[in-house]
Amino acid sequence: MRFRIPLVASATLIIGFAVARATGVVWLGGVVLVIGGAWCAWQWWRTLGVFPALLGVVIYFAAFVLSHPFAHVVGAWPSTIIVALVAGALACLIEIRASRRLDR
């Protein structure tokens, strides 16, 4: 299924936040993020190569980091959802560009 990796990346950003918020255990949400990010990195590396995998991880990490100051502006949940959508869209672009490069 195409774009499953960006979907998982976006979902784990949201689920990680939900777990941290629901349990009150922040590191538990971090575990969700690490597992999801590691799976996405592995899949990107396996299917698209090293550079797209590194780029995907940077986007994933940047989305997580940027969601924190953005939450002070729009609120925690809106921030999480917006950065997850943006990260997912950028991850889709990575997959499209990398797969076109591989198809040549």
Image: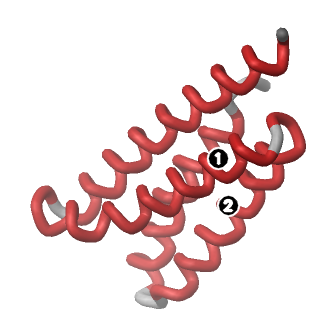
Q: In this rendering, is residue 67 above or below 82?
A: below
Residue at image mark 1: 8
The residue depicted at 71 percent of the width and 48 percent of the height is 53
The residue depicted at 84 percent of the width and 12 percent of the height is 103
Q: How far is the residue under mark 1 from the one under mark 2?
A: 7 Å
Q: Quadrant of the N terminus?
A: top right
Residue at image mark 2: 36
In the image: residue 90, left or right of residue 50: left
Q: Quadrant of the C terminus?
A: top right
Amino acid type at image mark 1? Val
In the image: residue 2, left or right of residue 88: right
**Looking at this view, is 42 or 10 the one in front?**
42
Q: In this rendering, is residue 19 above or below 5?
A: below
Q: In this rendering, is residue 53 above or below 36?
A: above
User: Does dot 2 land on a helix, a strand or a loop?
Assistant: helix
Amino acid type at image mark 2? Gly
Sort mark 1 into few (<14), some (14-19) or many (20+) by Cα contacts within 10 Å.
some
Q: Position of residue 30 (x, y in %)?
A: 55, 78
Q: Position of residue 101 (x, y in %)?
A: 75, 19
The residue depicted at 61 percent of the width and 47 percent of the height is 56
Q: Quadrant of residue 68?
A: bottom left
Q: Position of residue 22 (x, y in %)?
A: 43, 77
Sort mark 2 into few (<14), some (14-19) or many (20+) by Cα contacts within 10 Å.
many
Q: In this rendering, is residue 104 above or below 93?
A: above
The residue depicted at 13 percent of the width and 56 percent of the height is 74
Find out whether the residues at labels 1 and 2 contact each other: C-beta distance under 8 Å.
Answer: yes
